[in-house]
Every structure is written in C-alpha cells, then in structure tokens.
Image: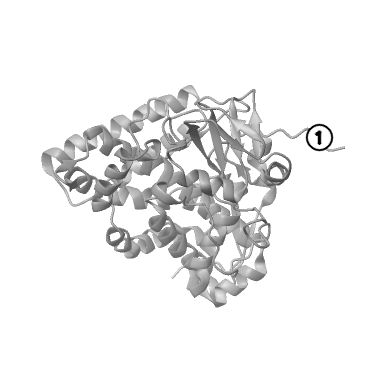
Amino acid sequence: MAAPLVFDPYSYEIHENPYPTYARLRSEAPVYHNAERGFYALSRYQDVRDAMQDWQTFSSQGGVALEGSGKAPPMIIAMDPPRQTKLRRIISTAFTPRRVAEMEPRVQQLTLHYLLPLLERPEFDFIRDFSAKLPMAVIAAMLGVPEEDHDMLRNWSDTLLHREPDNPHVTPAGVEAAGNIVQYFARAIEERKRRGGVDLLSALLAAEVDGEKLSREEVLGFCFLLIIAGNETTTKMLGNAVDLLYRHPEQRARLVREPQRIADAVEEVVRFDNSTQMLARLVTRDVSLHGVTIPAGARVLLLIGSANRDERAIERADEFDVFRPPVAHLSFGIGTHFCLGASLARLEGRVALEEILRRIPEYEIDESRRERVHSTNVRGYARLPVIPRLGGEAKAYATS
C-alpha cells in the first residue's frame, strides 16, 4: 500500500529528490492542497504554463517564495502589470541583449581565472571554488562591484536562502543578510549618483521610458534580485550540469567531441533538474481545476520542476538527453514574467561548460560527500567534490 501523499517544500527529503513525489502529484493530485502549510500546488505542465500566463488570476503580488517577500525592496517578479510591464520596459533599456552579449569575453576570462588554478589540485569543491564565484563575479562586474566585495555578497546571499529543517521562516541570520545586501546597494546607488559610471547600476539609474525613470527603491530591488536570483540559480545550474554530465559519461564524451552542442546541453540541464523548482502565486478569484476549487486569496505553488518532467507534454521527460530536439520547458518562465536574466544564464552556462569540458573531459565526483542546499525555491548543491582525471599531456594543455 502506497504511503500517504505529502508534499512539503521545506522537507530536506524533498530537497534531496523531489521527482518521485512530483510524479505522484501529477498522477494523484494535480491540484494538491497542504492545509498545514497553507498552500495549493499545480504540478502538470499545461496547468503550470497556463497559470504563468494568467497573471490576472495568478498574481505575483507577495513574491515568488511561499513565505512571501518580507521586507525586500520592490522587485518586478513580485509585481503585476501594468506597473510590472512599465518597469520591465525601463530595465530592459539598460539590461539589454547587447550588454549581455558583450560580456562573453569577460565571462570566458573569469571562467579561466577561477578554473585553471583548480586543475593543479587533486580535488576541488566545484561549488565553493568555481560555480559560486563565477556568477557573482559576472553580475558584480556588470554592476561595478569591487572584487574584494564578491565573497561578502555571496555569503549574504547563501545565508538568506538557507532554511532550517521543516522551518518555513528565514533564519535570523538570513534576515540580517538581507538587510546587509540592501544597505550595500543603497550606498552604491548614492555613490553612482555622485560620480556616475559606465556599469549596469549607472545605466539603471539613467534608464528612462516615456519620461519616467526607476525610483531609488526600484533600482535597489533589481540589484537585490540580480544578486539573489541571478547569482544563486546560475551557481546551482552549473553544479547540476557538472553532476549530470558525470552521471552520463557517454553524453559528456560526445559533447567533448561536439562542443557546438553545449548550448543544447544547458537547455536540457535546466529542463531536467532546474535550479528554480517552484514559484508562488496569489490567487485573485476562485479557480476550479481537476475537481478542486482553489479559493481566492490562497497561495499556489507552480511546480516548474514537475512540469518539466510531465510525460503529457514532453516525450521521455524523465530521461536526461542533451541531444534531444528543442523542448518548450518552463525553466525561465513564459509571458510577462519571462526571466530577464535568461540570456545571461545561458551565456554563463555555455561558456563555463565549454571551458570545463575542453580542459577536464574526464573527472569524478565523490558522491559520498555531495551536499544539497536547503531552500524551498532553489535546487542544487552546497558542496560538490570533483576529482579531475588528467594525464600528463592533457594536464599540460588544460592548465595552459
């Protein structure tokens, strides 16, 4: 007899492997209700996709985390149109595809800066020594943050996202960390106002559409969002990619031979084991779906990680295949809330994997010492011990 179906996003067991529970949700309870935690959850692809596009019913007010956004500065992911649309237009004039594309040489430079010294070691922690550093360095470079502050900002970000077992609340240390991030960028904004600059933070302060600029608080909110969401999701995406390719050596070997397919590999990683597993929404009216009525005012989790594994929408959804035809996954959202940082994440993922596979085509992971991060929204590793396997000639090339 099957155990009772319980989905608790704060459970460490779910953090380790949510996918069997997701499969049961899609089959047994596509509209799931957890009365104790006070939320509903949608797990099927079409339901999640439809909800993402229906912002009038599934509102982003209150933030994308189940516990809400607390006292965080105003962020576009916690707004609805028309204000969200206007802010997105203003931000997009500064955070342009061209600005992101122009970052590629810098992303490659930073990748090699962090990667090459690691190849001299018999073992390194991929998260601590590489994937936690690269996204922060890229975002910080865009915002004009000094290098000596990178570790401090990353530590604050990690602390804010951590949750204790079965506890939905931000830890006291996390609350303090959030305040530190806000204060840091408040000072940075005042400094840019005094002296100007050519970085993204300066561009955000100058951005204007129809005579309207971003307020100080809105600029602060976007910086906060980049540091938290942009940094952490890419950090975990890179770790998930290296882990998945380790567990699928035949696909890794083919990517080494066909590096032009690495962009496809990034797409499959974020589909198969996305670092953003779920987004919360606030229901503005009663919604009846699959025989269940979700009442107005309820919090609903859109389970992206489950939707991307739904066999109803994606063939062989539970198989990891970096060479599959393009799939319309939901990892970067859809519609008005499509992720503004998607192109940057894809760029970082492609460039990092190109250099990693070029220089470390063979490696092992000490699975006994892998550690998961414990967060409701973010899935990935806190620790990932990697052992490079390089012969003499290969090592000489890898470190050159």
Q: Which residue is mark 1?
A: 3
Confirm whether residue 316 shows in the render. Answer: yes
Q: Residue at x 18, y 41 (%)?
A: 213
Seen from the viewer's position, the closer of residues 310 and 146 is 310
Give the quarter of the figure containing the N terminus: top right
Seen from the viewer's position, the closer of residues 148 and 73 is 73
Give left or right: position of 217 versus 254: left
Give left or right: position of 322 versus 62: right
> Could you tell me residue 126's position as x and y percent?
53, 52
Give the quarter of the figure containing the C terminus: bottom left
* Image vertical order of residue 47 relative to residue 326, above or below: above
Tag 1: residue type? Ala
Picture quadrant where residue 247 is located: bottom right
Picture quadrant where residue 201 is located: top left
Colour scheme in use: one colour
- Secondary element type, mark 1: loop
> Could you tell me residue 72's position as x and y percent?
37, 29
> Could you tell me residue 373's position as x and y percent?
57, 40
Q: Residue at x 35, y 37 (%)?
A: 75
Give left or right: position of 100 versus 244: left
